[in-house]
Image: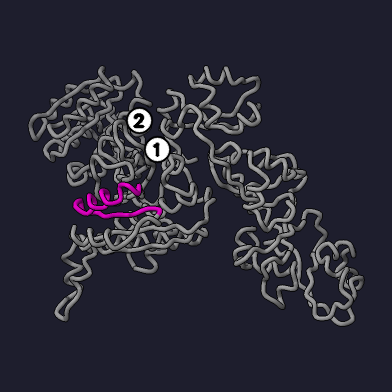
Amino acid sequence: MHIKRSVYILVFFISGFIHAQNYVIYNVQPEDTPKSIAQAYAISLDELYRFNPDLKNVKSLDNQKIVIPKKSSNNLSFVRYRVKTKETLYSISRTYNVSIEDIKAFNPQLYQKELQAGEVIRIPAYKLPEEYQNVDFNESIKNSNFSAFRHIVLPNERKSDILQKYDISAKDFDSLNEGIIEIQSGQLVKIVRPEKENEGVDIASLDMALQFYKVPKKQTLYSLSKEFKISEEIIYRLNPIVRAEGLKEGTIIKLPERIEALNQAEKIVDLESRVQNFNDKNLALLLPFSLQNFEGDSVKPKQILRKDELLNVSLDFYEGVKLAIKKAKSLGIYTDLKVYDTKRNPKVMDSILMFNSFSDRDAIIGPIINPNILKVTEKLADEKIPVFLPITKLDDSPSHVFNTIPDSNRQTETLITFIDSIVTEKQNLIFITDSTAIDKHEKYKYSFPQAKFLKIRKTYVEAEEIENLLEKDKENWVVLETNQIGISEKVKSLNRFNEGFIRTDPEAKEKETKEPVPGDSIQFDIRLFTSDRNKAFTNVVENKDLSNLKFTYTAISTYDILESNDIIEEYIRKNGHVPTRYTLRGFDLTYDILLRLAYEGTLRKEEALSPLTEYNENRFGYKKPFMSDAYENTGIFIIQYKPDFEVEIINSNRN
């Protein structure tokens, strides 16, 4: 993902000279001449004419505004641009990433009159410094499957070079870039790749996990296909640059992940640094506010708010949505949000769907009540509009539905993958499960057939049953899956067994008292795991015990260990309290949707859905499970208690 980031760095770098305001606007005085102005500002006459070419053609300089460079710059050039119908200074400034004042400065006639269609103006562009002259900043774009994007004109690059590079016609290029009279180095031009009929393999249907791969010296297409066990055609389809330019040493290409790479921790992607689509985003929000309950003279709003939990959830979530839209706006992402009160009534949902069109919406967030969810998914099935379920989950969902709450099975599978990646012969692996965790027991037994297993059929377990499974000469990794308080209470027994090990540990001995304590004769090194940290753990087991046992668990949210950040601190300053779980949920989900749209332009492509992201308390990354049509969120945290009551997210790899 680093490759794409360099494109954005360059875009801002190109405009950096202009934004730095390395010039001044000078109001010409009656006695001034070009020569006297150049002498006064210690610049050459040629430099003055380069910034103000119209000075050569005017007889009088009276009342003119001209540009005076603060220092000589050979890197500044200008793009001649013909204004199109309905274009404004604002739209042109956004297209070229320069300010309106910059455009006016180099086109002084715009101080006196409005912009006219057909008028030719000069737009400042910054040439690349010498050290960047041979760098191809478009490499990631050329090697992408984007259908529409912007190309950065490289030094000495001609229009014909660009046409050949992207296999487009001069007519198509000119229609996309109507106002451009001639291309200049550093300029951004629009490119839309022509649609082609599918040849052979349909990449979109393969649902493959991809990795970036740097082509080594002497690598051939044949050896690459053999190494990754894929056809040359798939390499071509994933990497258009290879088909166009061949396989070159040092090129970064996309390839399916090797099997051994699947066990590696997924990287967290920062989509804020990958924003490239600035079209307005259109969202719809469906929540059960039931605002009709506030109507009438006898209504007591505070009493309703105190009793109506679903209303509070909706209001808090909506607050988070608004915060996300405000945050996205600061990145230049503008959102049109339509809010609908579903009133918890399927008939109202029917009415909303009947009298409103959602065809222009990029995504729908909600509803949260199952009958309404079914109405929405059935009604909008043909339009395939992405529907994100923010709080509830729908089994057997159609392909346009996104379950944003990770499945409990995925939590178990995440823990299995984590343990499998770090377990060695030095650990004694023990699985303790109760009657509510039969499926988990079977998964653990299949994944770790050599481990020890204890199936509890009662609502409690004896300490001796656990002690019989422990070994003194190994690390005892105990995976406990239960929602029975009587069973989780025995975690204290585990800690008692573990305290003997802690007390006799040489490093810990210096910190501990030398007085005898219970358990000194028992020396077990124990670490506790679970895939479901439910009330059987949180309401019964003390944090001290969990810290001593290096308690490790999977979670779909980090709200219980929430860390402060700019969003949370700003909310506290304005509201006097920490945002609720649902406010942060509303923010995280909405902000993630907007960033994915700004990254890929659509939510109907795998490229927009697969990146794993993280915000205040949630992670998002969407994949289709085997034999399922709906997308499931794969964003799971692995959290570990540390000494001194510290808590750490141990799968926090960032890209």
Q: In the image, what residue type sits under mark 2?
A: Phe
- Residue 407 point in image, percent of width and height: 27, 39
Q: Nearer the viewer, residue 538 or 490?
A: 538
Residue 312 appears in view: no
At label 2, counting other C-alpha atoms closer than 10 Å, the crowd grade (few under 14, some 14-19, many 20 or more) is: some
- Residue 650 point in image, percent of width and height: 39, 38
- Who comes first in sequence, dot 2 or dot 1? 2
Q: Residue at x 44, y 42 (%)?
A: 605
Determine if the magenta segment contains residue 374.
yes
Q: Is residue 592 above or below residue 485?
A: below
- Residue 633 point in image, percent of width and height: 34, 42
At label 1, counting other C-alpha atoms closer than 10 Å, the crowd grade (few under 14, some 14-19, many 20 or more) is: some
Q: In the image, what residue type sits under mark 1?
A: Asn
Element carrying mark 1: loop
Q: Are marks 2 and 1 in contact (CB under 8 Å)?
A: yes
Q: Nearer the viewer, residue 505 or 530?
A: 530
Q: Is residue 457 above or below residue 635?
A: above
Q: Which of 484 and 390 is in front in this view?
A: 390
Element carrying mark 2: helix
Q: Residue at x 44, y 35 (%)?
A: 204
Report how far apart the C-alphas of labels 2 and 1 lie in the structure.
9 Å
Q: Residue at x 41, y 28 (%)?
A: 262
Task: Tell me the number on the disc at residue 651.
Answer: 1
Task: Tell me the number on the disc at residue 437.
Answer: none
Judged left or right of residue 526, residue 110 is right
Q: What stretch is highlighted in magenta?
A: 362-384
Quarter of the figure with residue 620: top left
Residue 248 appears in view: yes
Q: Name the residue under label 2.
A: 418
